[in-house]
Amino acid sequence: MEDPSNSPPEGDGGKKSPEKEDLTSRTLTNYMWMLAGGGSEAILKIAILLILARLLTPADFGVVSAALTVVALAEISGQIGIAPSIVQVKKLTRSHVETGFVTTLFLGVVLAILFYLLSEPIARLYRMPEVEPLVEVFALLFIIKGAGLVSEALLLRNMQFRAVAMLSLISYSIGYGSVAVTLAMMDYGAWALVWAQLAQASLLTLGFLALARDQLGFGFKWQAFTGMLNFGFGFSLVRIGNYTSQNADFFVVGRLLGADALGLYSRAFVLMATPARLVGQMGDRVLFPTLATIQDDRARLQRALNRALSLAAMLQLPMTALLLVSAPEIIVVLMGEQWAPAIIPFQILVCTLFFRTAYKFINAILRAAGRVYVAALWQWIYAASVVAGAYFGVKAGLAGVAVGVGVAIAFCYFVGLYVVFRFIGVDTSESLRRLFIYIIVGVALSAAMFGLRLLLLPILGGLLTLLTLFASLGLFYVVVFVWTPSLFGGEGEVLRERFLTRLNKRSSSKA
């Protein structure tokens, strides 16, 4: 008789055969749901950032950024890849779910205690005494997030992307946005950001637990734990390397230039990274579980990766042109004069927008193919390059850090393409051809928008000029999709077809 503990958890039902429906269509539909939810969240994040930028000082943002960078490292290290292994494993059993749930809860408590005790050394490491009490409170994040990791993984494995997107949007708007703005208006300073982080994490975890409650349970089996650890440890190495590459510049700026400089740099980074994370993180969360279903089919992996990279270039390079040209208005008009020193670092960071997005797709295909240790090696090369770029660039201030980090990111993207070809056999030459075309499009758009900005700024002023530039980018996409969709190649045709199909369905249902 079969051990019920090894039966698939309710609601999982094993992975659906990719032959049952077209992979590109299904993946794109899931991606667009995540993109829609992520897009709403991204717009909300920018709006809240702009409000908070006028209520708080760069130093407030700097000390919170310093605390969060260390929290994130400990959080990634302590997860040991349990949740991603639940997404990736070919046959998920109840033992996997129960063991993973107990493990992440236990590790969350252990890390919370450890982190609380290490708050003073962490503050000394950053040379910021004001970081210590923030770190002590942030220790609670380990318990809160640890409780929701497995339930989130189950939702992603079951491809419930709409639910995940909606939960993220609601938790950010109610948990982070309302709390942060309210407390900032009450002069809580940096603590407004601290309590907002805790509120957002709590709402998100409660939502994940509610949606996956029928599949969760308590239990522990050593065999299930070691199986998940085998994949999960390598995955953790990948994430620690990724963390280092994403946060090394924050540490260098905070330790060597101080809280004010870190506040300026971190807000410039967030403004730049929001579009990149919108496309990259949403795509990664869809691609990883989708590609895991075809991890043994190299031809389909190759088509999926080339399409994803081309789509990222189509969305990100025109956005790069817009943000590069309109940076002074975005920073000074919307955030205030105190943020003016962030303009040049922001413009430099924006030039790496595509590479920051696309590297997530490379990471996703390496993980989906089970090459987690290869991905870890690549991520550590990436991390070492960012550390070197930030360290040598800091002598030239924030702009120097941005240049050093940007060069490192571009270099490691192309290294990643080679790694995918060398270890998986996936050729990305098609995406490189599309990238070249979109670079030309981006340069042309930059020139056109720069001329438009020079023409409109004396007449309309900063805010109306900024709105006009954003509208011109939207008009560009509409014109291309309607009259010359071939400019956007296969990725544009697929998007256009999916949009028209959904539009026709809605029209038919109304009729």
Image (cartoon, grey):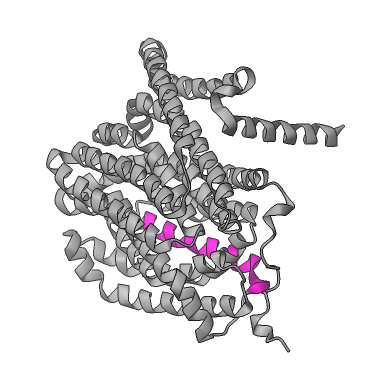
Corner quadrant of residue 296: bottom right
Q: Which residue occupies 32% across, 30% down?
A: 332
Q: How far from the left and from the top, in percent, is residue 134?
A: 31, 63
Q: Is residue 259 magenta?
A: no
Residue in front for this viewpoint, 439 or 459: 439
Q: Is residue 198 magenta?
A: yes
**Residue 180 can be seen in this image:** yes
Which quadrant is home to the C terminus?
Answer: top right
Q: Residue furthest right?
A: 511
Q: Which residue occupies 44% across, 61% down?
A: 371
Q: How far from the left and from the top, in percent, is residue 147?
A: 51, 72
Region of the chain picked out in magenta, as a range: 193-215
Q: How far from the left and from the top, in percent, is residue 412?
A: 32, 46
What is the total number of numbered labels drawn onto the structure image?
0
Q: Which residue occupies 23% across, 34% down?
A: 341
Which quadrant is home to the N terminus?
Answer: bottom right
Q: Residue furthest left?
A: 395
| Magenta highlight: main SS | helix
Residue in front for this viewpoint, 229 or 207: 229
Q: Residue furthest bottom?
A: 1
> On the picture, is 482 further left or further right than 417?
right
Q: Which residue occupies 54% across, 23% down?
A: 487
Residue 297, above or below 318 = below
Residue in front for this viewpoint, 343 or 243: 243
**Residue 44 can be seen in this image:** no
